[in-house]
Amino acid sequence: MLLSFPTLRTLALTALTTALTGSAALAQDSTLTRLIRQNQLSMLLQNRQFAGTGWDKLQQEVRGSQFVAVGEMHGTAQIPQLTAALAQVLQPKIFAVEISPSETQDLNRVVDQPAAHRAFQQQHPFALSFFSWSEEAALVRQLRAQQVQIMGIDQDNMFAAGRLYSRLAELSKSKATKTYLLRRAAAIQAHDRAVMGSQGEQITMMQQSAASLDSLVNLTRKESAQVQALVQGYVTSARIYQNNVKPATNAASHLERIGLMKRNLLLQLRPYQPTGTEALPKMLFKFGAEHCARGLSRAGVYDVGNMVVNLADMQTQKSLHILVLGKQGTTTHGFNPDDASKNTTSYSAESTSMYKLFFEQAAPQAWSVIDLRPLRRALVSRKLQLNSTALERIIQGYDYFLIIPETTANLVQ
């Protein structure tokens, strides 16, 4: 088929544009690769102890910080071990985590005794969120032994509905209300246990109607302020979960959750600053990687990590933000209450991952500790230009990127 001159010109321009774009991409990759190599140290984990130049550097940074925020890949056994080691260096007074204030009370009550913790997990599967896992529970036990306050600031987790109803029953003064709540607690727990392993979308909190939630509010209207606060927290949590799975309300749901975490954090910090002028103690945060960056998160939200920066700035102090991801291995990814083997999955770094160049430069055996601040300066000076806004936000938001060469899954108690 013959091609007209305009078509030939279009093809030529397209080819030139593609070539130039490819060259630019290669140049960006080359600059990023060089910066990763130049600012990478190694760290080893042996017999639950860390060593190496990377660990030496991290310890130095932690000692000079008032707040340390760990943005993690959930479900890996190595990250709570790292967090425990960081806590030994930082010596925080507060450990803020991604569970609800209500769950925190149950966690504090059972975690110090492994047998009690296992019994709670069997009765209320996954009602303690991540701290249903052995390594995460061990981390909390260590922190409590250090006299660290565990501060949960998130919504109620979706597997905790049965436990929430039984807790309301424990606190209610009305005999009729107590009887009703206990009956509902047993029914919800049985239903959720049956579906959580394979039909998580059928979990009570994901399906509970607005009328049912209104009935719970009305039922407890004459109960104590503590009961009413627990009910309001549960209603808010159900709304966030249900809206999160709807495309039209997903973004608003995410913002509502972030706002809730920030309010809970400030509320629980109030006793440390009764006049607003007292210095806050050292704090250690551990949340999902989406939540701990300074500035805009990868999703474009000013998340908890940015509030950490604000709290540090108020005191002319420093916050340190650490991203920790695994390159490959196994992770806990599932909520089967009866067969723990079904809660573990294997993974490896995808070739399309925005962290591809980081993973490619990572050491095959040791942990890689990459100082992102020189990369951040290169972005600001335009010496490094990236096509990924999400990756830019990660580099702008975190000070260090730790890559674990191979992870193992957390174990369920």
Image (spheres, rainbow, N blue to C red):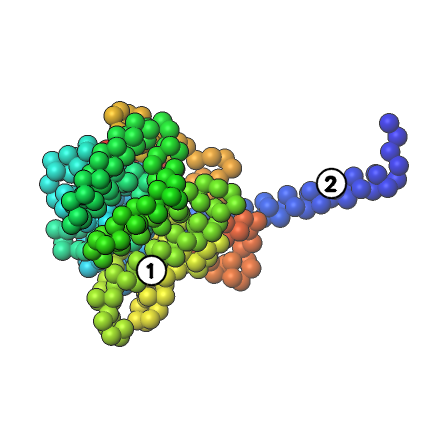
Label 2, label 1: how far apart the Cα atoms are: 53 Å
**Dot 1: element:** helix
Q: Which residue is mark 1?
A: 263
Percent x, y for residue 293? 40, 55
Task: Report how many numbered discs are placed on residues in the image.
Answer: 2
Q: Position of residue 145 (x, y in %)?
A: 12, 51
> In which quadrant is the N terminus drawn?
top right
Q: Earlier in the sequence, mark 2 or mark 1?
A: 2
Q: Is residue 286 above or below residue 280?
A: above
Residue 47 seen by the camera? no
Between label 2 and label 1, give the one nearer the viewer: 1
Of 17 and 236, the residue lying toward us: 236
In the shown orientation, is residue 371 left or right of residue 18? Answer: left
The reply to whether discs 2 and 1 touch (Cβ–Cβ < 8 Å) is no
Please tell me whether residue 396 is drawn above or below residue 325 in the rendered image: below
Apparent side of residue 92 relative to residue 305 in the rendered image (left or right) = left
Residue 98 in the image: state x and y as whole percent: 30, 49
Q: Position of residue 334 (x, y in %)?
A: 33, 31
Judging depth in this view, the residue of 208 and 404 nearest the camera is 208
Is residue 337 visible in the rendered structure shown here?
yes
Residue in view at x 39 percent, y 33 percent: 201
Q: Secondary structure at mark 2?
A: helix
Give residue 15's mark.
2
Q: Is residue 210 above or below residue 91?
A: above
